[in-house]
Image: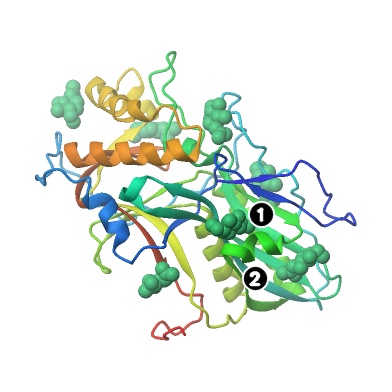
Amino acid sequence: PALARAESRSPCDGQTPVSCFIPTRDSLLWSGVRTSGMGVGCHRELLLLLLVVGMPASLAGSQPQQQRKWPVPYRRFDYRPKTDPYCQARYTFCPTGCPIPAMKDEDVIEVYRLQAPVWEFKYGDLLGHLNIMHDAVGFKSSLTGKNYTMEWYELFQLGNCTFPHLRPDMDAPFWCNQGAACFYEGIDDVHWKENGTLVLVTTISGTMFNQMAKWVQYDNETGIYYETWTVRASPDKHAVVWFESYECSKFILRTYQKLADLGAVFNKIQTNYTSITLFTGEPIYLGNETSIFGPLGNKTVAAAIRDFYYPFKSHQSIEEFFLNVLKIVDQVVLNHQFYLFYNLDYWLLPIKFPYIKITYEEIPLPNEDNTWVGL
Ligand SMILES: *[C@@H]1O[C@H](CO)[C@@H](O)[C@H](O)[C@H]1NC(C)=O
Ligand SMILES: *[C@@H]1O[C@H](CO)[C@@H](O)[C@H](O)[C@H]1NC(C)=O
Ligand SMILES: *[C@@H]1O[C@H](CO)[C@@H](O)[C@H](O)[C@H]1NC(C)=O
Ligand SMILES: *[C@@H]1O[C@H](CO)[C@@H](O)[C@H](O)[C@H]1NC(C)=O
Ligand SMILES: *[C@@H]1O[C@H](CO)[C@@H](O)[C@H](O)[C@H]1NC(C)=O
Ligand SMILES: *[C@@H]1O[C@H](CO)[C@@H](O)[C@H](O)[C@H]1NC(C)=O
Ligand SMILES: *[C@@H]1O[C@H](CO)[C@@H](O)[C@H](O)[C@H]1NC(C)=O
């Protein structure tokens, strides 16, 4: 959500490195949600309060499945397709973006973890206050003194990446769900520091930065679709993960890992990230758009998917997004079913207790001894 950037553009090589962030209530970039002002157990209540009855999931027409590899690998593509003109961004994606500059090999570059709440959602006492955290990474060149911000987010905002459009002229739900990397000059210290984090995580050479830049280009061209949900068998730490999300914090985690692979050594600090997780029995593969909604598709399955997404049609603002999440909760709790769209395929999830959870948990920086306890 949103960071709506001021329209005053600053070219990356220009002399005015200021890019201005104005978080707005209904522009929406997601990276995370964390509770504030309430004790740790409070997100649990969010869902428990909505629970009605626990009944075993009924698997509609379960057929023998081929052996699967879990989690289902996130699909990479050869190139990024043009977005469909139907998808119109309310806020321009990456308005002050620029190509990643080449650094001198001998430069020394500081790398910062950036995290900030972009929106605070209040839904009576039920949800408490949820701060949506957005993750980014900052770089500062010692040779030029210039600094930069890099992030990955939705082209058409979170609602569009999570719920499709049901268009009267089309059978298949229509998705505006691309996400991409954005690199621009400047770090807005106040924005990140005030209610979030701006902390040095490592220092790298110009050579490493340039290698990272090549990887970013590859990653940005091949990892195209935003995936909101993490899907697991249970809250247990060792439970099977069926699907990993693919959103802004995952890009930051991949970037840190890439830097570690290139030799960066990270400071010891605690780094938490938010996820929205669904809990389910083994997912059932349904097919892709063509096989389900095409002429040979199973009309019952096609109608069930449209019905599932019908209540989530309007998702302009972050408020509406979360209201839709609540509707999803209602629906999954009552019916024990969720139709997931992942890698352009549809899956039926036999949802089970505790259904859905929003967490803000640690994922350590690379190279760290995981038994280390933060201070
Ligand atoms: C369509 O799918 C439903 C639910 O999986 C199943 O019960 C039904 O037999 C299928 N129909 C056809 C014609 O394959
Ligand atoms: C979501 O997609 C619809 C359809 O293109 C578009 O009208 C709307 O502006 C998008 N929402 C945002 C917040 O960009
Ligand atoms: C990533 O791809 C998007 C979409 O093509 C583009 O707008 C953006 O500039 C790219 N980001 C980087 C860092 O190259
Ligand atoms: C980034 O550069 C701006 C403009 O020079 C400066 O105000 C800010 O403090 C710098 N931030 C960091 C983290 O280096
Ligand atoms: C930080 O939080 C306070 C209290 O919620 C709020 O008034 C302020 O605008 C926030 N600052 C930023 C930069 O979002
Ligand atoms: C959809 O699935 C069918 C049958 O499994 C497959 O032949 C086809 O290539 C898939 N289409 C796309 C666009 O992935
Ligand atoms: C960060 O994550 C750790 C472990 O996952 C957790 O114990 C801690 O409470 C989290 N911090 C916050 C501020 O939520």
**Can see residue 274?**
yes
Q: Looking at mark 1, is its residue's CB closer than 8 Å to ligand 3?
A: yes
User: In this figure, which residue is indicated by the disc labeled 1?
Assistant: 217
Is residue 85 depicted above or below 120 in this figure?
Answer: above
Identify the residue at horizontal 74%, vertical 49% (top origin): 97
Asked which quadrant contains residue 288, the reply is top left
Q: Is residue 267 left or right of residue 34?
A: right
Secondary structure under tag 1 reads helix
Q: Amino acid at mark 1?
A: Gln
User: In this figure, which residue is indicated by the disc labeled 2?
Assistant: 112
Identify the residue at horizontal 74%, vertical 54% (top origin): 184
Q: Residues within 10 Å of mark 2 (few under 14, many from 20)?
A: many
**Can see residue 362?**
no
Label 2, label 1: how far apart the Cα atoms are:
20 Å
Is residue 143 depicted above or below 302 in this figure?
Answer: below
Q: Are marks 2 and 1 in contact (CB under 8 Å)?
A: no
Q: Is residue 186 left or right of residue 236?
A: right
Q: Looking at mark 2, is its residue's CB closer than 8 Å to ligand 4?
A: yes
